[in-house]
Amino acid sequence: MKIETRAKGILLEPLLRSRVERRVEYALGSLAAVVRRVEVLLADDNGPRGGNDQRCRIRIHLDGLPPVLVTDVQADMGVAIDRAAGRAGRTLARLLGRRHDHALDRRLHANADGLAGEV
């Protein structure tokens, strides 16, 4: 799973990028096998004026399905990242749980079997 992180109106420091990657990887967990790419946009909507304007938008690209888009806005960027990542994981799990796509199930299990041999 490839995670692309961009920032608008804020400095994307390595620590912040690392937090995004860790949180997204954790939230998507075992579902990461069906994810092609994740785009994360961090933005400060109001600039230096302050307020609840720290936005984290996560777009998850899947094979054969439309992208999943989740956005959260908070006063603190860390909280926005955590909440958006959590919602993205739950939304993806719900979407995949509704689909009875056997090819998708086979890919998940095949990837899990391949990872088991690496331990």
Image (cartoon, grey):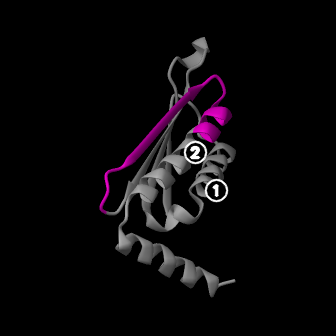
Q: Residue at x 64, y 56 (%)?
A: 26
Q: Secondary structure at mark 2?
A: helix
Instruction: Using residue 105 as the reference point, say whether residue 81 is left or right of it.
Output: right
Label 2 packing within 10 angstroms: few (<14), some (14-19), many (20+): many
Type of the residue with mark 2: Ala
Please tell me which of labels 2 and 1 falls first in the chain: 1
Q: Secondary structure at mark 1?
A: helix
How many numbered markers are drawn? 2
In this rendering, is residue 50 above or below 104? Answer: above
Q: Residue at x 50, y 77 (%)?
A: 109
- Residue extending furthest top? 49
Residue 78 lies in the magenta-colored region: yes
Between the residue at mark 2 and the residue at mark 1, the CA separation in whole angstroms equals: 9 Å
Q: Tell whether label 1 touches label 2 (CB within 8 Å).
A: yes
- Residue extending furthest bottom? 117
Give the image quarter of residue 11.
Answer: top right
Q: Residue at x 49, y 68 (%)?
A: 33
Residue 39 lies in the magenta-colored region: no
Q: Residue at x 55, y 42 (%)?
A: 87
Provide the residue span drawn in magenta. Answer: 64-83
Query: How far from the left and from the top, in percent, is residue 52?
Result: 59, 19
Instruction: Using residue 72 as the reference point, say whether residue 66 is left or right of it.
Output: left
Query: How far from the left and from the top, in percent, is residue 68?
Result: 40, 47
Give the image quarter of residue 54.
Answer: top right
Q: Which mark is residue 85?
A: 2
Q: Which residue is mark 1?
A: 26
Give the image quarter of residue 102.
Answer: bottom left
In this rendering, is residue 114 above or below 87? Answer: below
Most foreground residue, 66 or 18: 66
Query: How far from the left and from the top, in percent, is residue 37?
Result: 43, 58
Most foreground residue, 80 or 101: 101
Most foreground residue, 6 or 97: 97
